[in-house]
Image: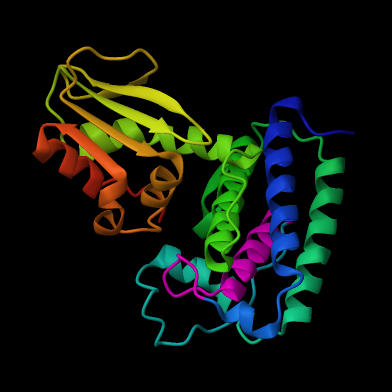
Amino acid sequence: MSLHPTLQPYADAWTHSIEAISELVTPLVEGEWNRRTPCPGWSVRDVVSHVIGLDCEMLGDPRPIHTLPRDLFHVTNDHQRYMEMQVDVRRHHTAPEMTSELEYVVIRRNRQLRNDSRDPGTKVRGPLGTELTLADSMRQHAFNVWVHEQDLRTALGRPGDLDSPGAHIARDVLLEALPDIVAVKADAPRSSAIVFDVHGPIEFLRTIRVDIQGRGTLETAPALGPAATLTLDWETYVRLACGRVSLEAAADRVKAEGDPELTSAILRNFTVTP
């Protein structure tokens, strides 16, 4: 038995990111686990707890029976409450407890992936009782773990892996959200084109074309005379799209050309993660 070939890139990306996370946190002393990360309300310990919880759910483990405190200011909706459960239940775990559990979960997940022969279209459990395909679940998981690796790198002052396998999956996941951001949320003019020019460890030039019905499509062909062009580096793109930095804080790293109202509307609606 072996993993389906179309799923292997997601498994490889997860492996790369989870090993990087383990390497980042294993040498930390107790106090460093309390460092603030770009995730609102979450410390290094909390992010690692979340990653552990994500993999426990990929393994099919039962969710913890736990009552959340009422004073968690950063928890404002059902999705955040769902995600916070795995975090809060580990909030008082020591550094050795955290690294030991992380190591054990990684061993179990590696074993699961080695023996997984399911079809990519197999339906599996998702957050809040949702159902999605195994392929979508593994892709989203690889994306999530890479983003949280970046959260930890930011908190610990250890930049890196901006062009890793997980980064390439993150690029594809984030690009898929652009047509909806531009055409629906930012309400871009019909029969217009908006260009995104991203440079850095991962580079790409993409055009969102809005047709006469107001539907947006993602294209690789450059546009002549676009309604707007946004130029920024890859790290800033990720941090904005994942809600890790405010638009005001990143303003000096984003070059906006064209219709100022349109570029402002796009950037105001740029965050795609919950």
Q: Nearer the viewer, residue 90 or 68?
A: 90
Q: Which residue is rendered at x = 39% and y = 23% of the image? A: 205
Q: Which residue is rendered at x = 64% and y = 67% of the image? A: 48
Q: Look at the picture and state if 30 lies above or below 213.
A: below
Q: Quadrant of the N terminus?
A: top right
Q: Quadrant of the C terminus?
A: bottom left
Q: Nearer the viewer, residue 201 or 167?
A: 201
Left or right relative to 217: residue 259 = left
Q: Is 58 part of what is drawn in magenta?
A: yes
- Tell me residue 136's x, y (percent): 58, 38
Q: Which residue is rendered at x = 73% and y = 75% of the image? A: 98
Q: Which residues are magenta?
A: 36-59
Left or right relative to 17: residue 150 = left
Q: Look at the picture and state if 67 lies above or below 118.
A: below
Q: Look at the picture and state if 155 lies above or below 5.
A: below
Looking at the image, which residue sits at the far right? 1
Left or right relative to 162: residue 267 = left
Q: How many marks?
A: 0
- Tell me residue 142's x, y (percent): 62, 45
Q: Main secondary structure of the magenta part?
A: helix
The colour style of the image is rainbow
Q: Look at the picture and state if 218 lies above or below 185.
A: above
